[in-house]
Image (spheres, rainbow, N blue to C red):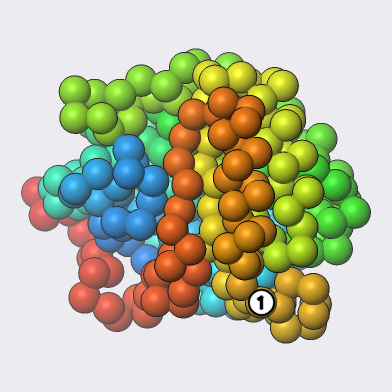
Amino acid sequence: MDTVERCLACPHKCGVKRTLLEGKGYCRMGLSPKIARVGPHYWEEPCISGNKGSGAIFFSGCTLKCVFCQNYEISANHVGTFITPEQLANCYRNLEEQGVHNINLVSASHFIEAVIESFKIYRPKIPVLYNTSGYEDVESLKRLEGYIDIYLPDFKYSDNRLAEKYSGAFNYCNVALAAIKEMYRQTGKIVYDKNGIIQKGTVIRVLVLPNHTKDSMAVLDTIRTHFGKNVLVSVMGQYTPTGEAYKYPEINRKITENEYEQVVDHAIELDLDGFVQELSAADEEYIPNFDCSSSDYFCYESSN
């Protein structure tokens, strides 16, 4: 894993050379994972966080450039610490020892080589969740089959013009749909344990943007058409204008109660299974702390 001469890991297909610590592609990252936070996370959907938390590992960098990214500090500014696949495997062990419900890999797709290597070193005894923007390469996803139990993709847009404007991905809609179909193929229908904690399946997130409720409703239509009630849908009202959202007046505010209710009502009309948020979640206090010196940041050495 020292060098990739021509990286094709994500849909951008940059084809650039990536070394351990450097890369000139869209994500601007090398091959070594760079992570900004490891620890129990309690703000995912109820069937994911439960009462013990989801064992989240937040990776730096991203294959999208969402101007409103809630994790802008790490996705665009690349805050974080480099680790090895062996250290990543030890993160899994440490999280398991904390008693979390699952291992939650947040935006890991540009480090797929290291992720697969880490699973060969240590396979977690609890479900592994792949938390993604939805902008994934199908062939890369196929390489993850057998390692991932739960997929948690965003389905951000139904209009590629919005995807290009706000996330730098002109072909997002088709790519995301194909990717989520592959995720569902791998996981099948939702499976819970006796306590209602998800063990297998695909949960699709739809973040409602201000002034774009029709687009969110169109995304829900697409989900209903292609997946029916075989996936869970999480309609999210937590949008907060962070990152560079201030440059776009139409999205430089939180969503209104009326906007959110329109989308939620549409999900109900479509008879989709899943979750809705309280609008109180639209607050910066729910953005994780990415200070690597914080008390909830794990050391990379196994305690065994």
Q: Residue furthest left?
A: 304
Give residue 198's quadrant in the image.
top left
Give residue 192's quadrant in the image.
top left
Residue drawn where x is 19% and y is 23% of the image: 194
Residue 228 visible in rendering: yes
- Where in the figure is residue 58, as x and y percent of width and height? 44, 60
Q: Residue furthest bottom?
A: 246
Residue 110 left/right relative to 37: right
* Residue under pointer 1: 253
Residue drawn where x is 77% and y is 39% of the image: 218
- Where in the figure is residue 234, as x and y percent of width and height? 51, 42
Residue 8 visible in rendering: no
Residue situated in front as seen by the camera: 113 or 52: 52
- Where in the figure is residue 286, as x and y percent of width and height? 40, 70
Residue 231 left/right relative to 207: left
Q: Amino acid at mark 1?
A: Arg
- Where in the figure is residue 59, as x and y percent of width and height? 48, 59
